[in-house]
Image (cartoon, helix red, strand yellow):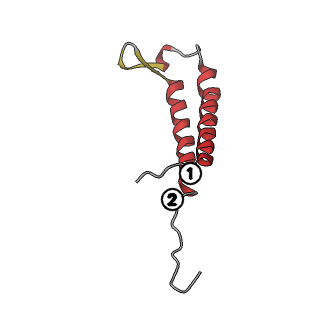
């Protein structure tokens, strides 16, 4: 079941995604812009579907960052972590 994200969580998630994309662009994409050798560019599915070393490195960085952001979001929500069950008669 998918739970709704409250506005505060949504804002935090948006900020994490924004930061991750900016960091990947700054560290992986822009330093290699127009600097790649031919062997660093490969065809994926056809002549107009190209993938570069920069694309793959940025994707790896984004995967790590977004996985962490999702884990933080789930960790603060009900069901994200194991909770202690109350025993009858105990607070």
What residue do we see at 59% from left, 24% from top?
Answer: 29
Q: How many marks?
A: 2
What residue do we see at 60% from left, 48% from top?
Answer: 9
Q: Is residue 24 above or below residue 68?
A: above
Q: Residues within 10 Å of mark 2 (few under 14, many from 20)?
A: few
Nearer to the camera, 88 or 63: 88
What residue do we see at 64% from left, 22% from top?
Answer: 31
Badge 2 marks a residue whose secondary structure is loop
Badge 1 marks a residue whose secondary structure is helix
Q: How far across and down, in percent of the image, does residue 71 sit?
A: 54, 51
Q: Is residue 19 above or below residue 4?
A: above
Q: Is residue 65 left or right of residue 2?
A: right
Q: Is the N terminus in the top left, top right, bottom left or bottom right quadrant?
A: bottom left
Q: Is residue 22 above or below residue 7?
A: above
Q: Is the C terminus in the top left, top right, bottom left or bottom right quadrant?
A: bottom right
Q: Residue furthest left?
A: 45
Nearer to the camera, 69 or 38: 69
Q: Is residue 34 above or below residue 54?
A: above
- The circle on residue 73 is 1
- The circle on residue 45 is none
Q: Residues within 10 Å of mark 1 (few under 14, many from 20)?
A: some
Specify which label sits upstream in the sequence, 1 or 2.
1
Q: How far across and down, in percent of the image, does residue 68 sit?
A: 56, 47
Q: CA distance from mark 1 to mark 2?
A: 8 Å
Report if the CB atoms under discs 1 and 2 are less than 8 Å apart.
yes
Q: Is residue 52 left or right of residue 27?
A: left
Quadrant housing residue 42: top left
Q: How far across and down, in percent of the image, does residue 5 sit?
A: 53, 48
**Residue designated by label 2:** 80
Q: Residue furthest bottom?
A: 89
What residue do we see at 52% from left, 15% from top?
Answer: 37
């Amino acid at each position: 079941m998918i739970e709704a994200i409250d506005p505060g969580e949504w804002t935090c998630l948006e900020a994490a995604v924004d930061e991750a994309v900016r960091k990947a662009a700054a560290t992986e994409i822009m330093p290699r812009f127009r600097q790649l050798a031919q062997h660093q560019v490969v065809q994926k599915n056809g002549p107009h579907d190209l993938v570069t070393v920069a694309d793959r490195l940025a994707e790896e960085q984004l995967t790590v960052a977004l996985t962490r952001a999702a884990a933080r979001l789930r960790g603060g929500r009900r069901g994200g972590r194991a909770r202690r069950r109350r025993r009858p008669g105990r607070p």
